[in-house]
């Protein structure tokens, strides 16, 4: 471990603990380009992306964040070559299995969000095992969005509410933010304070559309496999310089 890495085991001194984002969401982009720049096939970037994710989870835990949500696989990602889809599913399954002992040790609670019933059976089984095992953990809440789409999540909530109306359980004019949010995939999800996207793309890409309404957005040109603690430090530092007004004027 280098001196720089050792120093980053703890919350860097220039970050204010009381101004840390409670919840960070990440669009992990740039695995393919990372591999191509090294003359490797595109898909070889994904295992290195998993290494970066493992380190970010540890870092969020070490620095005392409450929640981390990452975009692992979108509903649109099925359109990628079959070999790539299979590799990503395998990597997610290996991660859920391989990281379980450390998640238990660190008291991390794992949750998934997305249409899980369309995933390979062995992955679904591993997801059940790992989420059940970590259910009572009270440390970092780590959520992976798998086969997730923001529009699909909103539609899912609309359909559930429409059914409630049809059954006479709720009057349409009584529908409010809270009753709507109860039907999102993870109703207890606090909104992300900070949304990070790597590889320089300036898009939301159907991620947490409802929840990011007032999130601060941080975009870095760094490709996902290169996103390390120093990069995360920079993102948090930048976040702490922002003035969050939520539509109000400065107080
Ligand atoms: C974007 O890179 C990355 C993805 C679509 C997949 C990310 C998935 C992982 C890192 C798997 C791990 C997830 C878990 C929960 C273990 P890209 O291929 O779109 O990059 P490019 O834009 O440079 O081609």
Image: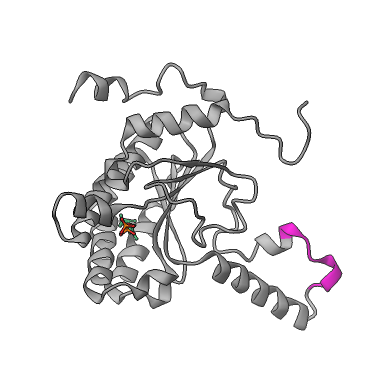
Determine the quadrant in which ligand 1 lies.
Answer: bottom left
Quick check: 180 above or below 29?
below
Tell me residue 103's x, y (percent). Answer: 32, 45
Q: Look at 22% across and 54% down and name the residue there.
A: 45
Quick check: 45 above or below 106?
below
Q: Look at 31% across and 25% down and name the residue there.
A: 9
Q: Quadrant of the N terminus?
A: top left
User: Bounds of the magenta span?
Assistant: 170-178
Say whether residue 57 is left or right of residue 249.
left
Q: Nearer the viewer, residue 103 or 75?
A: 75
Say whether residue 129 is left or right of residue 51.
right
Q: Nearer the viewer, residue 16 or 185?
A: 16
Tell me residue 170's x, y (percent). Answer: 80, 72
Q: Look at 72% across and 78% down and name the residue there.
A: 162
Q: Nearer the viewer, residue 6 or 64?
A: 6
Tell me residue 149's x, y (percent). Answer: 50, 67
Quick check: 75 above or below 28?
below
Is 174 contained in the magenta span? yes
Say whether residue 148 is left or right of residue 177.
left
Say whether residue 126 is left or right of residue 189.
left
């Amino acid at each position: 471990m280098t001196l720089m890495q050792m120093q980053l085991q703890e919350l860097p001194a220039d970050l204010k603990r009381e101004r840390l984002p409670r919840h960070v969401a990440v669009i992990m982009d740039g695995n393919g380009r990372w591999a191509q720049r090294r003359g490797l096939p595109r898909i070889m970037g994904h295992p290195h992306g998993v290494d970066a994710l493992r380190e970010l989870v540890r870092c969020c835990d070490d620095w005392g964040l409450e929640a981390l949500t990452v975009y692992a696989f979108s509903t649109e990602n099925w359109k990628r070559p079959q070999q790539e889809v299979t590799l990503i599913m395998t990597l997610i399954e290996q991660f859920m299995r391989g990281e379980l002992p450390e998640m238990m040790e660190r008291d991390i609670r794992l949750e998934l969000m997305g249409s899980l019933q369309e995933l390979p059976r062995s992955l679904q089984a591993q997801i059940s095992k790992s989420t059940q095992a970590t259910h009572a953990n009270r440390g970092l809440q780590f959520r992976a969005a798998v086969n997730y789409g923001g529009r699909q999540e909103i539609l899912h909530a609309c359909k559930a509410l429409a059914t409630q109306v049809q059954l006479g359980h709720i009057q349409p004019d009584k529908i409010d933010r809270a009753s709507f949010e109860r039907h999102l995939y993870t109703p207890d999800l606090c909104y992300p304070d900070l949304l990070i996207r790597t590889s320089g793309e300036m898009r939301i890409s159907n991620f947490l559309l409802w929840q990011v309404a007032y999130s601060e957005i941080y975009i870095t040109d760094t490709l996902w496999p290169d996103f390390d603690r120093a990069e995360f430090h920079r993102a948090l530092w930048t976040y702490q310089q922002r003035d969050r007004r939520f539509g109000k004027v400065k107080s």
